[in-house]
Amino acid sequence: MISHISSSSESKSQRLIALDILRFLSLLSVIAIHSFDTNRILHAVASKLEAWAVPEFIIISFFVTAHKLNKRKYIINRIKSLIFPYICFSILYLIIRLLKKYTLENFFDWSIVSHSFSILLFGGASGHLYYIPMYLLYLIIICFFTNHLVNFKLSKLKSISYITVISLICSLFLSYAINPLLKVSLSDPYLTSFIGYFSHYLPYPFIGIFIFYLYQSDVLNIGLVEKDLCKLSILSLIILIYICQFEYAFITRVILSSLIFLLALSFNRSLYSYKFTNLFTSIASLSIGVYLLHPLLIETNQLFLGKLLNIELDSFFITFSVWLFSGVIASYSLVFFYQKVIYERKS
């Protein structure tokens, strides 16, 4: 989901190992959100992770590709690289939903078929697929802003800072004023759900780009951010947000996600001396495949354990095992071997 920063940026940021690690942790958290719902304690943990897991994906993605977002060719290639796997997985999950409904309830749900176009367009085939069309729409919007609406009399940093503030205002307005009205007026539940996700996560692409230009301009002194006192201050703020249970508020979530990203960035340079961290760069390349695949493996395992073996899914051990073995180990293994086969065929 993320490509490397260009050579022009590498002189300053070099390899962003810390962001690869953060992306890995974010994906583990997303998998936890989709698998911890069967146990009360772990579900409470997942609700805490939900505050930053998806936002970090978005911030990282747009931070590392900020320098490419004014290039139409990059946007087109990015859309092409994601649209085929997205359609394939959407059709797969759609078929599974129909079969699952028919098998468990002996009922063929024609409403799924009648909404098939909307489901494919807005990621309604499975609860996690909204991310791909949302991400692609963000790319198109930001490409448009970059090429047409940015005031080039201002610096890029000033321009993107203004747009970031506007995105925050728009997100609040859409989330709390427009979306409630749309839920009443729109008959398409998949469109309504997509608009909700889109408006909620709207500021994060611009925050990622804003931090990138801040990072490149020396306004954000990375040497200062890397100081122990600064790291401790950021960590203290993150802990304070959780202690006070402020992570559920919209603005606080934006602050929390930004702080976690900056904290990860502050550790980047200190991680170069550890050879094992290079492993995360390879692991990070599997992210999109794991993201698309993991709910299928989790639900299959839960169905097998619960329906066929009559094992109670609400125990801590079973829920954690499903997350670890189905969501994490099996998902990463399958995607790794798939990519290896594809690479060997091409070579």
Image (cartoon, grey):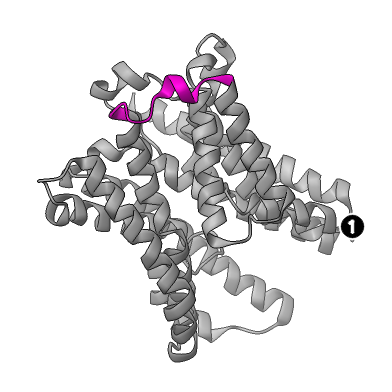
Q: In this view, does 165 lie above or below 173?
A: above
Residue 62 in view here: no
Quarter of the image for the C terminus: give it.
top left
**Which residue occupies the extreme top position in the image?**
273
Q: Nearer the viewer, residue 59 or 117?
A: 59
Q: Which of 277 and 262 is in front in this view?
A: 262
Image coordinates for residue 130, horizontal then vertical, percent? 47, 62
Residue 339 in view here: yes
Q: Position of 229 compared to 221: left or right? A: right
- Pointer 1 residue: 311
Q: What residue type is labelled 1?
A: Ile
| Magenta stretch contains residue 218 | yes
Count every numbered label the image shows and give the total: 1
Image coordinates for residue 16, horizontal then vertical, percent? 43, 25
Q: Residue at x 51, y 61 (%)?
A: 92
Element marked by disc 1: loop
Q: In which quarter of the image is residue 290?
A: top right
Q: What stretch is highlighted in magenta?
A: 216-228
Q: In this view, does 45 lie above or below 171?
A: above
Q: Is residue 66 above or below residue 226?
A: below
Image coordinates for residue 270, horizontal then vertical, percent? 53, 15
Q: Which of 323 and 146 is in front in this view?
A: 146
Q: Residue at x 49, y 69 (%)?
A: 124
**Which residue occupies the extreme left position in the image?**
153
Quarter of the image for the N terminus: give it.
top left
Q: Position of 138 compared to 113: left or right? A: left
